[in-house]
Image (cartoon, grey):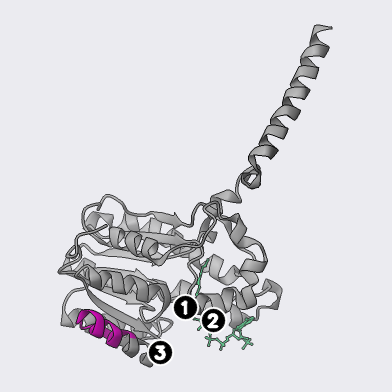
């Protein structure tokens, strides 16, 4: 889909880049010529991923254990990175989530998610954005959100609230930092199964058993290459006018819940012809009444 050197000369920081979606996006950026920096809470996971990329692509990937919940650690880390050279891209991918009835959440349970997603993502975005403003760099930010920024979502309320706030951050900073050429967009993926997320969102197949998957008009989960391609398009030069947007990548799943008639997509051709003849019968009977 893209030229191999599309991202050549760009240095991109991916939070939570050692596993899951962050690792997939990092790999695609490397394949397209970017230099990638990954951070996350577990050093051994980051080291393994960096070693894997070295083996596969001879790419030297800078990695750093970092808990984005700590604003000082974030500031220090971003300072160090910029001392080594400018960043051009940031992917806010690090997150935390688990399913739970909201009434069973303690304050610490709520904070466990909100401190990572809501606070941590802001700390990283602002630390990097301030450097770009100081150094006059036209960087690009992508945050990984969820379609519940539009719909809300039961059983993941701390995540839904936090990601909705980041959706608002995306729109707000596009305006505030737009005059300096800094772009900020977001991707709202539908289900893209990964080990970390699925262990917390679909333990024992909870998502599949609830019938959630049958609500996807395209009838399948997302493919990593689809997420990688969108994340690369948004990071690359060439469409700088696109900013402040959260783009759903979900096979139309969230839209399918929104319309009164969405569930009718399950009906067969036979069902439709039966319905058509029932409606015709009603219309004919009305016409007959009108003519008498
Ligand atoms: C209720 C729970 C709980 C659960 C934890 N808690 N799990 N409460 N139900 N299942 C409560 C604990 O009881 C405790 O409160 C508080 O949360 C902190 O728990 P810790 O285990 O100490 O938290 P911590 O080690 O900080 O773990 C944080 C975490 C963890 C975020 C909860 O899951 C994590 O590290 N996740 C990272 C990876 C991840 O979650 N990936 C999925 C992202 S998917 P008390 O009061 O008891 O002390 C995503 C969207 C995907 O974001 C969209 C797909 C469609």
**Residue 55 among magenta residues:** yes
Question: Disc 2 to disc 3, how far (Cα)?
Answer: 16 Å
**Image-quarter location of ligand 1:** bottom right
Dividing the image into 4 quarters, which one contains the C terminus?
A: top right
Which residue is more in the foreground, 195 or 99? Answer: 195
Q: Which residue is mark 3?
A: 42
Q: Which residue is mark 1?
A: 116
At a point 27% along the width and 55% down the height, the residue shown is: 178
Quadrant of the rendered image containing residue 25: bottom left
In the image, the residue with mark 2 has its CB under 8 Å from the nearest atom of ligand 1: yes
Question: Disc 1 to disc 3, how far (Cα)?
Answer: 15 Å
Q: Nearer the viewer, mark 1 or mark 3?
A: 3
Q: Is residue 76 left or right of residue 115?
A: left
Crowd rating for badge 2 (residues with CA inside 10 Å; few <14, some 14–19, many 20+): some
Secondary structure mostly seen in the magenta stretch: helix
At a point 24% along the width and 73% down the height, the residue shown is: 30
Q: Position of residue 220 (x, y in %)?
A: 52, 59
Secondary structure beneath dot 1 equals helix
Q: Position of residue 184 (x, y in %)?
A: 33, 60
Residue 125 visible in the picture: no
Q: Is residue 255 above or below residue 34?
A: above
**Residue 51 among magenta residues:** yes
Do the numbered discs 2 and 1 sit on residues whose CB atoms are within 8 Å? yes
Label of residue 112 in the image: 2
Do the numbered discs 2 and 3 sit on residues whose CB atoms are within 8 Å? no
């Amino acid at each position: 889909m893209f030229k191999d050197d599309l991202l050549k000369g760009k240095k991109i920081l991916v939070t939570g880049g050692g596993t899951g979606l962050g690792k997939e996006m990092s790999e695609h950026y490397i394949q397209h010529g970017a230099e990638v920096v990954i951070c996350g809470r577990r050093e051994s996971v980051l080291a393994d991923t960096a070693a894997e990329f070295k083996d596969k692509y001879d790419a030297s990937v800078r990695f750093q254990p970092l808990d984005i919940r700590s604003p000082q650690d974030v500031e220090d880390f971003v300072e160090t990175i910029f001392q080594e050279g400018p960043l051009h891209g940031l992917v806010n991918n690090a997150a935390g989530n688990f399913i739970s009835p909201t009434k069973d959440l303690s304050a610490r349970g709520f904070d466990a998610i909100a401190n990572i997603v809501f606070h941590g993502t802001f700390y990283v975005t602002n630390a990097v954005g301030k450097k770009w403003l100081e150094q006059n760099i036209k960087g690009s930010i992508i945050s990984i959100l969820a379609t519940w920024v539009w719909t809300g979502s039961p059983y993941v309320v701390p995540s839904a609230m936090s990601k909705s706030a980041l959706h608002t951050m995306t729109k707000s900073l596009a305006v505030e930092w737009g005059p300096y050429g800094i772009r900020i967009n977001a991707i709202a993926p539908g289900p893209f199964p990964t080990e970390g997320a699925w262990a917390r969102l679909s333990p024992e197949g909870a998502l599949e058993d609830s019938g959630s998957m049958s609500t996807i008009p395209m009838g399948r989960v997302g493919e990593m290459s689809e997420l990688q391609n969108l994340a690369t398009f948004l990071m690359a030069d060439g469409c700088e006018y696109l900013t402040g947007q959260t783009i759903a990548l979900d096979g139309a799943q969230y839209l399918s819940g929104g319309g009164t008639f969405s569930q009718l997509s399950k009906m067969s051709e036979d069902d439709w012809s039966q319905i058509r003849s029932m409606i015709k019968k009603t219309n004919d009977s009305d016409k007959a009444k009108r003519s008498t």
